[in-house]
Image: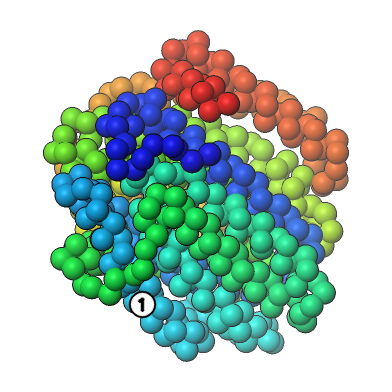
Amino acid sequence: MMDKENPAELPDSKGQGGESLVRQSSTVGFFTILSRCAGLTRDMVFMHLFGATHTTDAFLMAFTIPNSFRLLVAEGTLTVAFLPVFSQVREGRGMQAAKRLFAQAFGIFPILVGILTIVCMVWTEPLVELFASGFHGVPGKFDLTVTLTRTMFPYLFLISLVALSMGALNALSYFALPAAAPLLFNLIYIAAMLSLGLTLIDPPMYGVALGVILGGLGQVFLQLVGLRQVGLLALPKFRLSPEVKQILKLMAPAILSLAIYQINILILRKFASYLEEGAVSYLYNADRFLQLPLGVFAIAIATASLPRLAKAHAQNDMPKLRSAFAESLDLTNCITIPATLALYLLATPIVTTVFQHGSFTALMAQNTASALEAFAFGLIAIAGIRVSAQAFFAVKDTSTPMLCSAVGLAANFTFAPYLGLKYGFAGLALSVSLAAWLQLIVELVLVRLRLGAFGFRTLLHNGLRALVASTVMALTLYFGARYGQWEDGFGLYNACVLLLNVVAGLAVYVLMCLLLRHQTIVLLLKGIGKKL
């Protein structure tokens, strides 16, 4: 599935035009679909075996903490700080200079992340106290969370190697192997859960935790294969060059920006730790469904757009940069507007069909569906934030996204106490959605001030077309969902009804977009056709 061009001789047209963005996004999206399906299977197996209990709350919280640091110093900041500098060096000084920069980064950054990992493993208990002080109310729950968190923290070091490799591969327009890494992680995770988690280790959560580490090792191996194919695999160089210092300088505000986002997550988890048994699990499962359209489409588009935006900035081509940003946001809206309505209307059918079996009861499924409905309200905004932030990262501005994240944090601080007390875990999910909308509005205003006019009128017209088409789709789903027997949970009949609703809704949406002459849908269909 790798692109066959020599990375040193990639043509300029590779990064130009909406069709190119669709093609590159579809590569990321293809592997992300496989990854998300594997991730959904992973969660189905997990919930079938263990349900939504104090023990699963402990594991999911323990999994959340190193993942928060992963976003903070690895995939969240290291990739976006490294990629623009790497692109600039490659455009200005050639591929050999870019290779030297990568070797230097591969020598310095793993050491820094390794030190952070050791510190976090030593100070795990205070970290868990920050995230889940409410777990003290159940005997043994807090201590189990501490042990599981410490067991999974080495994953942070492994994923930092993956993030650095992904930045270099994406900058060279190699998207397949980086996008396939989460798929391999989920497959290893499932295998470990069904082997170590059930037969070799007691209690079983320790076996599942070891599966996380094994999955991280698999991801590292896959990226090494990609680096070898593009000629970047070389011995690390321990030199703090000016370019490495520039990456560190760009990372600082980006870390602060994502730290604010992680504080939002901390608020959500901390409130949830004081709520009823299973509250953490409900929010986690609902968020997994939200991440499906985000990961498959919005994040795939954002991932594919950053190299194009960074290249346009390196070439000092502002019209091209504005055009690339508008195309990315338009394509994102084309997907997330119908996905929002679909997730809201099909929340109960989806959750009951996927999770309601084994130890996962009907009440657990209904609670998860309530959280998903609240999260769905913020899908468009969360996706828009991811794409808009790329415009700032591409021009080496990591401070503005930090300020925008501060707006989101302040909003969450304002909404969460009231909504959490009034509506419980569903109120916490709604707080995240409201905060995301406010942050998106501020971010788009600042993008306009920084980049200039980027075709907002065209974006608005296409957004309205997508909204009209989505409304017709929503009517189809509303009536079609009535044929399901969702209270029965997982079963062949419900699975068929859900699948038919999804297919019918998608067909209606695409047909309506074509009738309304939504050009982005035409490009998307062409891209999918070429990929097939």
Residue drawn where x is 51% and y is 87% of the image: 125
Q: Nearer the viewer, residue 77 or 20?
A: 20
Q: Is residue 511 above or below residue 524?
A: above
* 138, above or below 353, in the image: below
**Residue 277 in the image, given as x and y percentages of width and height:** 69, 70
| Crowd band around label 1 with a 10 angstrom C-alpha radius: few (<14), some (14–19), many (20+) | few
- Can residue 152 be seen here? The reply is yes
Q: Which residue is mark 1?
A: 111
Residue flagged by tag 1: what amino acid is it?
Ile
Q: Is residue 263 left or right of residue 90?
A: right
Element assignment for label 1: helix
In the figure, residue 232 lies in which quadrant? Answer: bottom left
Nearer to the camera, 504 or 5: 5
Q: Which residue: 66% across, 61% down?
A: 188
Residue in the picture at 71% in, 48% down: 351
- Splitting the image into 4 quarters, where does residue 510 fall? top right
299 on left or right of 480: left
Q: Position of residue 14 (x, y in %)?
A: 33, 32
Q: Nearer the viewer, residue 518 or 434?
A: 518
> In the rendered view, how is the structure colored?
rainbow
Residue 262 rendering spot, x and y as whole percentages: 41, 65
Count up the numbered dots.
1
Residue 329 visible in the current orientation: no
Identify the residue shown where x is 66% and y is 43%.
347
Which of the two residues, 360 or 159, is positioned nearer the viewer here? 159
Of the 4 image quadrants, the one containing the C terminus is: top right
Residue 487 location, x and y as percent?
A: 82, 45
